[in-house]
């Protein structure tokens, strides 16, 4: 099931810095980001067979709906130091995007269409 990791934040008069070094429970194979999002539409709508993902909302906010076939949860991402780790098999849909939202995804695998499952559990 998906879970939250908090990145260590270093703040001083110049601003704040977060590092992803040794934060995620996997080796990074792919990085992507979503922006210019139409707030009336959802993103995601799939699960993976192998891929683990870390989702960071770098700007704005969104809600991530997770369903692993047994448990469901809704997680609001609105802090760039918070990472939602999405496990293989976690159906995930992102919506309720705030203005100028930027959602960063970090994945354990390279993109592979065969890893995607587009059928929800229910």
Image (cartoon, rainbow, N blue to C red):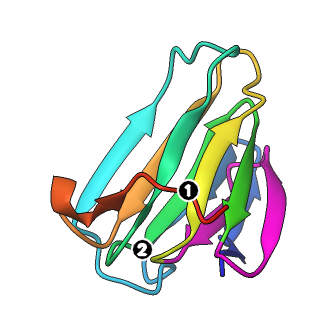
Q: Is residue 20 above or below residue 95?
A: below
Give the residue at mark 2. 52
Which residue is located at x 45 percent, y 77 percent? Answer: 88
Q: Is residue 60 above or below residue 22?
A: above
Which element carries disc 2, helix, strand or loop? loop
Residue 67 lies in what quarter of the image? bottom right
**Magenta region includes residue 79:** yes
Residue 9 lies in what quarter of the image? bottom right
Q: Is residue 112 visible?
A: no
Q: Is residue 59 above or below residue 27?
A: above
Report the side of 75 relative to 33 (left or right).
right
CA gap, disc 1 and disc 2: 10 Å
**Magenta region includes residue 101:** no
Q: Position of residue 34 (x, y in %)?
A: 46, 31
Which residue is located at x 69 percent, y 16 percent? Answer: 39
Which residue is located at x 78 percent, y 77 percent? Answer: 71
Residue 98's tag is none
Give the residue at mark 1. 55
74 or 85, which is in the foreground?
Answer: 74
In which quadrant is the C terminus drawn?
A: bottom right
Q: Is residue 66 above or below residue 88?
A: above
**1 vs 2, front mark:** 2
């Amino acid at each position: 099931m998906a879970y939250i990791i908090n990145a260590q934040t270093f703040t001083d008069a110049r601003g704040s810095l977060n590092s992803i070094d040794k934060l995620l429970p996997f080796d990074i194979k792919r990085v992507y980001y979503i922006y210019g999002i139409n707030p009336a539409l959802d993103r995601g709508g799939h699960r993976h067979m192998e891929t683990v993902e870390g989702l960071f909302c770098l700007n704005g906010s969104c809600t991530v709906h997770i369903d692993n076939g047994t448990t469901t949860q809704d997680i609001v991402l609105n802090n760039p130091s918070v990472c939602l780790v999405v496990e293989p098999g976690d159906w995930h849909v992102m919506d309720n995007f705030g203005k100028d939202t930027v959602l960063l995804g970090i994945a354990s695998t390279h993109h592979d269409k065969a890893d995607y499952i587009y059928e929800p559990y229910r």
